Amino acid sequence: MTGLTLRPMTETDIPAVRALHDAAFAASVSDQPVRDAHAALVAAPDYVADLRRSDVWLAERRGTPLGTAGWVPQDGAARIRKVFVHPAAWRQGLATRLVRAAEARAVAAGQGRFVLRANLFAVPLYQRLGYVAVEDGVMELPGGLTTPVLFMRRDADQDRTAADAPATARGGPA
């Protein structure tokens, strides 16, 4: 992706990041009640606090937000999170680039293991990046709804040769 900039998310980016997260999820999920519940989650005040506590970086081209990814320390590992790619940027390797950048920031902070909660449509992407399944789970959404997820992990020192091939996954939030 030419002309792409990766930079830390700022306070002024938060409205655009929320819109990006909502658009990416909505384009990835066909179940309207789940899409509506996720939109409510992104619109909730707690979502901003969640963004602030994650080391979220924004990918943009000419000022247009195209994707995000971040990480937080969790139980001795780096939890990769807030991986979202705008539908207009799907299938261009952006999710791979964002995840790898988040992993690199976590390694620089002393982390050696990565964990994540993958929406099911993102599992193929994470498998290509070397993540392995740990267990099935659900993500709680407003209104008592849930959506299935897969908890996954990867060690930082694991061979990434095959995993670094360009991603061809559908995109969206991961």
Image (spheres, grey):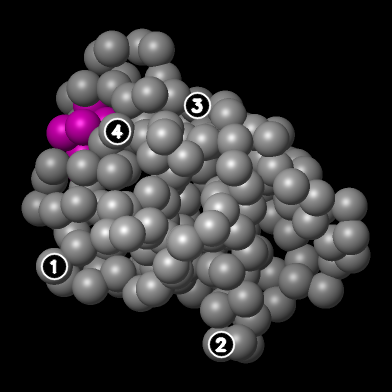
Q: Left or right: 55 with respect to 98?
A: left
Q: Earlier in the sequence, mark 3 or mark 2?
A: 2
* Amino acid at the residue labelled 4: Ala
Q: Which residue is painted at 64% across and 81% down in the image?
A: 107
The tag on residue 34 is none
**Residue of label 2:** 109
User: Residue 48: percent from the left, percent from the top?
Assistant: 18, 59
The tag on residue 23 is 4
**Residue of label 3:** 148
Q: Which one is closest to the eye, mark 4 or mark 3? A: 4
- Range covered by the magenta-colored residues: 37-42
Instruction: Give the class, few, some or many, for how many residues have Cα within 10 Å of label 2's Cα (few <14, many ≥20).
Output: few
**Quick check: 30 above or below 134?**
above
Q: Earlier in the sequence, mark 2 or mark 1?
A: 1
* Amino acid at the residue labelled 2: Ala
Alpha carbons under labels 3 and 1: distance apart:
32 Å
Q: Which residue is painted at 29% across and 53% down in the image?
A: 64
Alpha carbons under labels 4 and 3: distance apart:
19 Å
* Amino acid at the residue labelled 3: Pro
Task: Give the structural element (helix, strand or loop) at label 4.
Answer: helix
The verdict on residue 40 being magenta is: yes
